Image (tube, rainbow, N blue to C red):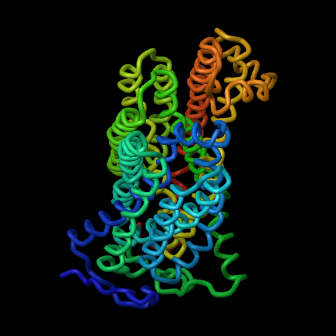
Amino acid sequence: MAIQGSDAGGARTGDLPAARYTDGYKRMVLGLLLAAYTFNFIDRTIIATIGQAIKVDLKIDDTQLGLLGGLYFALLYTLLGIPIARLAERYSRVNIIAASIVIWSGFTALCGTATSFVQLALYRFGVGVGEAGCSPPAHSLISDYFEPKKRASALAVYSFGIPLGTMFGAVVGGWLAQNFSWRVAFMIVGLPGILIAILIKLLMKEPPRGHSDAPRTAAPAAEAPSAPASKGLAGEFSEIWAVTKILFGKPAVLHVVLGVTLASFASYGSGHFTPPHFIRNFGIGLAQVGLVVGLISGVAAGLGTLGGGFLSDRLARRSVRWYALTPAIGLGLSAPLYLIAFNQQSWQATALWLLVPGVLHYSYLAPTFGVIQNMVDVRRRATATAILFFFLNLIGLGGGPPFTGWVIDHMAAFHWSHPGQGAFAALGGLFSADLASFKAACPGGLAPAGASAEAAALCKTAVGSATRHGILVTVCIYLWAALHYALASFGIVRELTSARAARGETL
């Protein structure tokens, strides 16, 4: 029988006797966390699908659109992740996740009331505040429920919330934006998350810390699963620094961190402008683009996320090098396929081509999270995820969409003043483009009312070409990410073996 009453009031679970959980109960816990992460990504990424409607309505440029989907969300999301993770090492992770869902769901709904860029930016900051409390405690919980050899697979199921959330956010958000408005879309997708928060609070219990780890032989008292979390500001900084040294001080692990950061940069940057690419270059509506992009994300990214976790766990039985080689191969193959996909001349061909690299490139998520969780002690796992997310999201999520938007804005200005030029010419003229004149002629990317047909066509063609070329620039970064994973494979066996030995676990 599963023991389903641990740490209900926020007490430290490490002081409790070992519990037994049925496979059915663990599947229920993983399902609830998957649902939470799905809503996390619905609320985070819906702005990519409805961004074109926001851009036209609020008269903003692509750099501002990238900031709304990137830095303005990521800033507080990353900064608050570490202190929230430190609380998760000591107090109920279930309570932290439930409260966080309520906060980010409320701010998502408030985004629908924004009447200016500044107001929408402030609400996006609020969404980031809430979402900071999701993945660090969730990764820690999953690591306590599932043993190391199944950890990447379990984290793959949790990470499946990324394609699921992106898919549902795109499909539902696009339909609502086209048939009602982008404001209604924010409100409708934001509020249901509160129901998930209630279910998590009522049904999910805290496992003892280190519940599923290998037995220990002679672990120091400070490292034992039952040891309380550090107290005092100096102790907290000491714990954060100890985890930081593991992530950034060990070459193989550092290459994994750099790989996931660069892959996230390319993924968030190109993904944020994929729906506008379909709208601007192929003229399809918000509902249709939501369906197309949503299905691509759900099928391709879903298969890649799950496949990467289960495949790397299986291959790791031969050698744990596959936790690095799986992402290296997937990312390396995906980049040229993305270049082919975004160069197609019809939306149908583009959509079909995008299915293939999507499966390959998302293989990096679960193996990466598995490596990070297996490198640290049981009361440092939420902290490890938070520090990893601080780095990869501040750079990847915070920088990817604004970078791509900035490239698109400047390439659009170049194409507007030099019609008919290709991607390499636009890249060469990136810093010499007359951005101010372009914005005056094409506010919000469209010619103003009353402009001539020639002026309208010039604005449309310039923005469409620039969107395609800006995405092509960004997806090339996948090759850089693949290189870091390949380099990580040379030392990852030694690092993981040493980490288990340092914790006193039987090998």
The residue nearer to you, when weighing 505 against 445, is 445
Instruction: Determine which quarter of the picture holds residue 457.
Output: top right
When the figure is inspected, residue 397 is found, relative to residue 194, above or below; the finding is: above
Q: Residue at x 42, y 86 (%)?
A: 13
Q: Please state the horizontal and vertical placement of residue 109, each as a whole percent of the image.
A: 48, 60
The residue nearer to you, when weighing 309 against 218, is 309
Q: Quadrant of the C terminus?
A: bottom left
Give the farthest residue toward the left.
Answer: 1
Residue 28 shows in this picture: yes
When the figure is inspected, residue 399 is found, relative to residue 52, above or below; the finding is: below
Q: Please state the horizontal and vertical placement of residue 470, each as a whole percent of the image.
A: 61, 27
The mark tally for this picture is 0
Q: Please state the horizontal and vertical placement of residue 112, each as a whole percent of the image.
A: 51, 55
Q: Residue at x 55, y 65 (%)?
A: 132
Q: Please state the horizontal and vertical placement of residue 146, each as a whole percent of the image.
A: 34, 67
When the figure is inspected, residue 232 is found, relative to residue 345, above or below; the finding is: below
Give the farthest residue toward the top.
Answer: 420
Instruction: Determine which quarter of the picture holds residue 75.
Output: bottom right
When the figure is inspected, residue 312 is found, relative to residue 202, above or below; the finding is: above
Residue 250 shows in this picture: no
The residue nearer to you, when weighing 160 against 450, is 450
Residue 248 in the figure: left or right of residue 26: right
Q: Quadrant of the N terminus?
A: bottom left
